[in-house]
Image: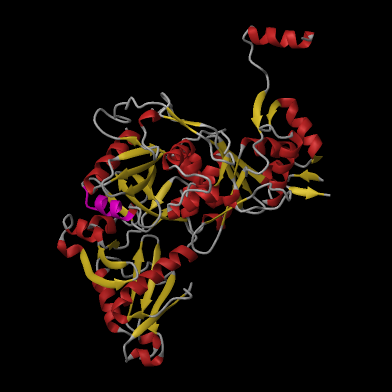
Amino acid sequence: MIADRWPSRTLRIGPASFHLRSPFRRVIDEVNALYRNYPAETADGIYDYAVSAVPSSPLRRWVKPNLRLECDFEPFDTLPLPVDLGMLGLEMGMNLQMAVGYRRHVVVHAASSANGDKAALLIGDSGAGKSTLSALLAYREGWRHLGDEFALLDLHAPLLHPFPRPISLKNASITAMEARAPADRFGPVLEGTVKGTIRHLLPPGAAIDKMETPAEIALVVAPHFRENAAPAWRPMTRTETYVRLAASSTNQALMGEAGFEAVWRCLAHAPAFDIMYGSSDDALELFETLWRKVTA
Amino acid sequence: MTDERKSDEMELAAGKASRRALLRLGAVAAPAVVTLRPAWATGGYHGGGGGGGGGATTSLAMCQIPIDKVCDKDGKGYDAYGYDMSTADDEGMVAYGGGGYGGGGGSGGKTKCYAPPPKGYYYGQELVDYQQSGRLPDGIYSTKQFDAHLKYIKNLKPGQSGFTCLTSLVHKL
Amino acid sequence: MRYRAAARDAYVVRPVDDLTLVYHRPSGMTHVVSPAVVAILDLLHERTLGIGEVCEQLAQHHDLDGEGDDIARVVGARLDEMAAMDIIDRIA
């Protein structure tokens, strides 16, 4: 098959659009299954980023097939992935395009969730707890999932734009969510990845349908899960909030004054709290109590 | 006592506030500027420091947090937001529960004082090392002493020496 | 050694709590700085001053606390730091 006849899929997530391609039909089939509810077209037929999963060598097209990524913004120093993790590879590729190539908004490695027309931003290091909390909120009455990996700050107003890709659950958080979300919203179990076991959870249909509706930022939270911890919280100073936001942004420092003002607006508009908890129920209760307090 | 000094004291006695505000210049070796520089994929930290070379940009982690004698659970202390920190645990976290925010009874613990670290301050790097390895800094042999120091550090107020250093390390601590 | 800052409008200065964010337009960099740095920067917009002059002018409006160290030494440290981070220029 020549490249322009490879199986492919155009995909829109929030304000960004991707064209995914691979000669490995099963990879695109898996993409189509997982992203079945996501728009498959762009308004004018033009997409933002091309991401392809190609055989790592001609032999690898057929023998112990594995693949590497070719994209507009390309990863380096990565090992080939086995073809059964091809869909993860394409997701990595999309993440990379957003982290490195996207400039329409300030990109923060953060989760976010909206309640009505206001939103909360969940920041923190990988593994601290923000993805799990955002998954819990995704299926919580009253909340609309905006994203688990990237939060997009508007450049002119204190708004968060959704990037509601399928939520990437890892290890223990998979079991936690299997008890709280319908079985048909889950993707396949993917084992043996560098992060352990991964399973995707589609956010509710409403989150995907409203992927172009931003929300006004009202609260910043840095969540931490710690085994057996009693629920606790402390306010973060604006200085600390600034430092953590800027350090979590892949492009704020590259976007000049517009980037500076976007983060500033976030600081000025929303109080910030560091929270700690030892269970999902405590996390939700603590978070929602804080939410009511700041939006009262 | 000179006449000038007498009239200054009379002014103070009359309760007149000084017309000049205090400006804390900081310490020579402690950074007063933290700059987040763009780095591949995620943000990176770099801080400037005076250092002996005058103008040389020293490593962020060489910034200093001075510590004097620390007395633990020494009566009520309120942080910048007015939260009662005397019930805070070693993390500086205020317990959540029962009757609203900042709940939890006072423990009525005894006051105990701990000596400062031998050199009178910590380098930021020593705190980072502790966080990563659990190893106490050089010259510190008592976990309780170090815990008291950490609690002091985490409750540093704006304007106190070392606050800028702490802020710049906040992502690592 | 003397120091000089760009015009006032080359900076966006936003106090937050105890510290201040300074966005330097020519470089696109954002710095988190202490009140001493804000006060020193304020004196240097399109003016070239030596350490002694900066100390004198600061002292006109502030009581200076160098934490026991010699004031000129500490102010010199602040100026060098600001120059190292390209917030101001060093002029021989």
Residue A287 versus residue B43 in the image, above or below = above
Is residue A258 visible to the viewer in this orientation of the structure?
Answer: yes
Residue A264 position in % (x across, y down): 51, 44
Residue B41 position in % (x across, y down): 49, 63
Task: Give the quarter of the image for residue C27.
Answer: bottom right
Whether residue C2 sits left or right of residue A258 in the image: it is: right
Please report the bounds of the magenta region as a residue range: A131-140
Residue at the location (23% across, 58% down)?
A205
Q: Magenta segment, principal secondary structure?
A: helix
Residue A134 position in % (x across, y down): 30, 52
Whether residue A1 sits left or right of residue B120 in the image: it is: left
Q: Nearer the viewer, residue A84 or A184?
A: A84
Task: Give the quarter of the image for residue A182.
Answer: bottom left
Q: How is the image coloured?
A: secondary structure
Whether residue A152 sits left or right of residue A87 in the image: it is: right
Is residue A262 visible to the viewer in this orientation of the structure?
Answer: no
Task: Give the quarter of the image for residue B26.
Answer: top right
